[in-house]
Amino acid sequence: MTRRIVHVDLDAFFVSVEQALNPELRGKPVVVGGRPDRRGVVAAASYEARAFGLHAGMPLAAASRLCPQAIFIEGSFTKYRDASQRFMAILADFSPFLEPVGLDEAYLDVTGFESIYGSIHQMAVDIKQRIKSELGLCASVGVASGKVVAKIAAELSKPDGLLEVAAGEERSFLAPLPIAKLPGIGKKTEQILNGLGVSTIGELSVTPLNELKSHFGASGELLHRYASGIDDREIETPTAAKSISRETTFGEDTKDRSLLEATLRYLGERVGADLRRRGRQAKCVTIKLRYADFTTITRRHSLSQATDSDQTIFDTGLRLLKKELSGEKRAIRLIGIGVSNLVESSRQLDMLNSSAQRLERLNRAIDRIRHKYGFSAIQTGRTLLLKDIFPATDDGYTLHTPSLSR
Ligand code: DCP
Ligand code: CA
């Protein structure tokens, strides 16, 4: 039986959620990311706005110059998270082999499911229809024998598309496409390949493997396989999350240590809450800083024992931060904290250590209260000063870049 992998990707996700909730925004150029007089970039642009050349990642000021009539919205992460959860729940009805990617994308393995839906094509139509009728959103769907081709098919079919690549057709489907369409090919790889006279995926697939390996090492082989339409990677179900992180860009670059520490504490609490919600613990804490000159660094520390405690995550992050900033003159543009090296929670090990036990009970109590009354119901001492800087909602602070502050 040939594998059938479905890739589903919501169109203009953040913007479409706003349009679904507010009919006045439909059919218009709309941008989520913030007001054009603020710093920051476009997180999502409606297809109407894209017609003016607007796209994700573009500075808001530039977007407003290109399309002055566009409607700029701050955005609210809770809305997108809710929509995402409902989206994933719909997909889970179609196949238990579901791999969410970010908020608005997922792969499903539906091999052999023809018998249930008549055909995989009909199943894809049903998926799109349920998303449309229950969420008011458009999804684009790609169907193929592997993830790479399914994803590219979904992307090519946008917006509101459906594209199926029959078994055996993968190679000829990919051949005319530019290499940049292939996942894993960034600007640098693209340049090197262009230098070798390779600009289409077809050309890449006939480039000798040795040559690719000499330039790209082990990933050269992967590139070659993907370019030939071969991709037998399995669907990975969500418990396989490898890291959890939160980061935010400041409205203005800052050297203010207490602001930096308060923001680190806040982001660390969000990481901790997410970690506990997933029933996992982490053995590695990482901080990320971007300086005013855009130099970006990450610093990590491995813990001797896995943790899911806000305090340990923050303390570790704070030590890394202090070390990094000692003697540092540059202002900070972005700060982030994350955990990795995740393991299933194992309570027993901690039981010997009563202070760890107390901290754990405290974290659980905080989680319960926040679950009931919203994230802002409890604020820890250190994060209080953020109250004067970021607008607070029930679900926490609205940071400068909401799309990145989850
Ligand atoms: N996003 C963001 N910042 C970016 C890119 C994306 O905050 N630089 C957010 C907003 C997007 C969402 O992630 O709505 C999904 O990203 P996609 O790349 O899937 O883009 P869209 O869903 O907006 O558009 P489409 O998939 O139709 O191209
Ligand atoms: Ca999308």
Image (cartoon, grey):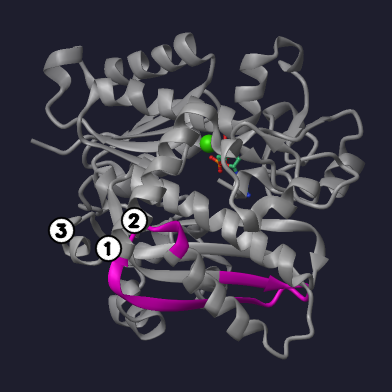
Q: Secondary structure at mark 1?
A: helix
Quadrant containing the C terminus is top right
Q: In the visual, does 404 lie left or right of 184? A: right
| Mark identifier at residue 358 | 2
> Which residue is drawn at the image coordinates 56% and 73% (left, top)?
318
Q: Position of residue 100 (x, y in %)?
A: 36, 40
The region drawn magenta spans 288-311
Q: Main secondary structure of the magenta part?
A: strand
Residue 292 belongs to magenta span: yes
Q: In the visual, does 139 lie left or right of 97? A: right
Q: Amino acid at mark 2?
A: Arg
Residue at mark 3? 348
Outermost left residue: 1
3D distance between C-alphas at marks 3 and 1: 12 Å
Q: Are marks 3 and 2 in contact (CB under 8 Å)?
A: no
3D distance between C-alphas at marks 3 and 2: 14 Å
Q: Is residue 373 depicted above or below 156 in this figure? A: above
Quadrant containing the N terminus is top left
Q: Position of residue 55 (x, y in %)?
A: 71, 43
Q: Is residue 14 depicted above or below 314 in this figure? A: above
Q: Is residue 150 visible?
A: yes
Q: Are marks 2 and 1 in contact (CB under 8 Å)?
A: yes
- Name the foreground residue: 241 vs 225: 241
| Mark identifier at residue 354 | 1
Classify 10 Å Cα crowding around label 2: few (below 14), some (14-19), many (20 and above): few
Q: Secondary structure at mark 2?
A: helix
